[in-house]
Amino acid sequence: MREQYLPLNMVSSGKKVKLVSVRGGQGIRRRLNDMGLNIGMEFKIIQAHIFGPCIIAVDSTRLVLGRGMAQKILVEEK
Amino acid sequence: MRKKLTIALAGNPNSGKTTLFNNLTGARQHVGNYPGVTVEKKEGTFKYKDYKINVVDLPGTYSLTAYSIDEIVTRNFVIEEKPDVVIDVIDTSNLERNLYLATQFMELGVPLILAFNMSDIAKKQGTKIDQNKLAEFLGVPIVSTVATKKVGTNELLDEIMNMAEGEIEPKKVVVNYGKEIREELENLEEILKKDRPLAGKYPSRWLAVKLLESDEDIVKKIEKSSFSEEILSTVEKSTAHLKSIFDDEPDAIIADRRYGFISGACSEAVSRNYETRHTTSDKIDKVLVNRILGLPIFLGLMWLVFRFTFKVSEPLMGWVEMIQEWLGNIFGGLLPDGSAIQSLVVDGIIGGVGSVLIFVPIIFLLFLAMAVLEDSGYMARAAFIMDRLMHKIGLHGRSFIPMLLGFGCNLPAIMATRTIEDRKDRFVTILVNPFISCGARLPVYTLFIGVFFAERIAGNVLFSLYILGMIVAVVMAKIFRRFLFKGPASPFVMELPPYRIPTIKGLFIHMWERGVVYLKKAGTVIFVGCVLIWFLSNFPWQPKYSKDYNTLIEQAQENEELASKLENEKAFEKMEKSYAGRIGRAIAPVFRPLGFDDWKTSVGLIGGFIAKEIVVGTLGTLHSVGEADEESKTLRQALQNQKRSDGSKMYNPLTAYSFMVFVLLYMPCVAVIGVIKRETNSWRWPIFTAVYTTVIAWVVAFVIYQGGTFLGLGL
């Protein structure tokens, strides 16, 4: 099952995903928590790219996740 | 006698706090469309029934951790100032995330009211909320509002009254963190209560939670407690214990339980019927933040911004100049001719401050253009687009906006770094900001480029200076990030606000808020600076002259040419013997390797420390050509013909360029030093900035001058 988990920047735009885990550092996860994203929540990828920051949609919010951050967020495609 | 009340407005960025603030107080504060607009708390008062109510608009925050300054400002205010009521403004269309902050206020035990703002949008999206039920669950009153339409303000006020009069007994609802965590919290609370002053100031439950979350700010506070050892060792034990049970950091479990609590409450009281839809904003974003088109569009917009600024400000600057001249004539006529007081008012104050006010149009127009980008929501996109490039120098997109503002004036630019959460990123952004060429440096370029470069390359020369400033900023940022502020790149998460059409009122308020910082500088620091420079370059008022000029001039009455030549000679000698002349002479040799070892230039550079725009004014005064500005022909000729003692020309295009590079890079003006002191909260960084920028300026100008000379460009 583990293979299904992908870093956020590897998912293609338009997909719906579920946040599985966050690698590295308390800081990143805490920040995500503050911005309304917790492990297990679902969101949609608006724009993602391996070498760039990503835009995601959590409810009606659009969030930018910096490039370094997107690599550390593991998601499961729905 | 009216009773006094203090209420605080808190909430997520972009939740409509400031709009609500304006509704309540009738104020006209700027409502932005860029996360983190309210960087400083704003206050206003109004009267309602028999109360005089003081409202404090706190910076928007997502949380109450010690992650950013905004969050610390917010939570310190709530804890230390103990407002009578805290209103947490909730963006109802993002309920869960907004309630996450609310749970933290609940934990603080403050008298809390939730204002469910933008309830109309939520309804449109298909969210139905059973408000009474939700209020019951959370134990706090809820009032639904639509701040933009001024709906619900009175209901909110009534609820505030009820709470202030003690008619509502706030229920203590606490998040259930589960048995294991609860036990540790209770255990910690017991120990925390031993420190009476601490327990009197902070709710012990909140302290305990924060300690388990390993909140740096609170840990620092505990370290000062007389029970610090006992407390911290217990925290350590608890943390280790919880880690072993959950196989995860306690703060993650705490966040998880908070979200669990929220979704528990919402599943009972909120029903939703919608999918994440593609909005108009998403469609616009398909183009504007497109991976290929995004950057060119951004650059194009920047080009337009500068084009607009310079084109429109040109005639306006002419008007300012006219007014200045007119004032000079009036006051010059009123005051006794040739007296020190006339010289002070006309040359020192009107001339000096006027030479600064001339940039008001440029700076205000640039900020107006920036306001359009910001209020429309584009600025957040620009941060996104630039993230990829900023990433390469160890910063992220957020640091880019202060850089852009720096082209107007570095003061508001450095103040804007408050939206950067990470301390290291923020400090690096502050330290390199002075290299971004502000509007005040422009007249120096205009003067020297006008004199020493052909018109067809003038634009390119000017452009090269701006680019050089940016390159130095980028290189230094990279160096600082590598050596001075080491560590991994900080996480970058930012909300992209929906696009909005800016309102004219909003734009002007916004422009004014930033521009007024510059005006204040002109009115205070620069005013004093001009007087000081005037004093230094005019005193001693009657120096010992080498010749008896007065008699000679009188004798030469018949010969006008000789008389005026003598007048000039006298003025020059006076200048040379003034304090400024002496200081200039002392430091001029330092600039010898850079090609401009003239004492007058050195005095100009000292003046530039007070404000960069003073450089031109000082040069004008020192070349004793009366009123000087970048257009004045006489100053141009004076510069062109200036010779060293050995007869060689002082300036040529190469020395002029070297000089401009030095002005671009050397120490920022005193107002910027002041703001760096304020923003970094220590004298260390402003002093460091002043020194390192000057060293860099010297080195870069040295390389350019010596390299240029070697290549034979100096002739």
Image (tube, grey):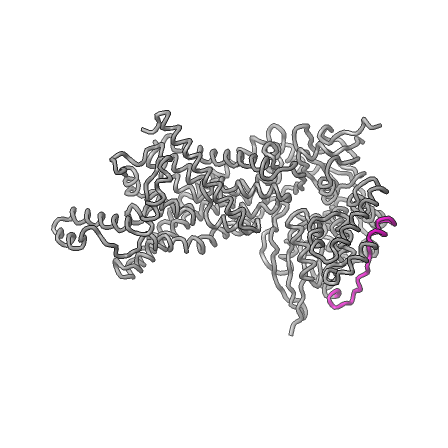
Residue B124 pos. (x, y %): 74, 46
Q: Is residue B197 left or right of residue B27?
A: right
Is residue B201 something that shows in the picture? Answer: yes
Q: Residue at the location (17% across, 53% down)?
A: B548
B693 on left or right of B541: right
Q: Position of residue B217 (x, y in %)?
A: 69, 51
Q: Of residues B273 and B408, which is closer to you in this image?
A: B408
In magenta segment, residue B9 = no
Residue B482, relative to residue B360: is it above or below? Answer: above
Residue sitting nearer the eye, B125 or B445: B445
Q: What residue span does the magenta drawing correspond to?
A: B162-185
Front-most of residues B534 and B46: B534
Q: Does residue B143 show up?
A: no
Q: Residue furthest top?
A: B711
* In-image side of B660 versus A60 (left or right): left
**Quadrant that contains the C terminus of chain B:** top left
Q: Which residue is drawn at 52% across and 45% down?
A: B368
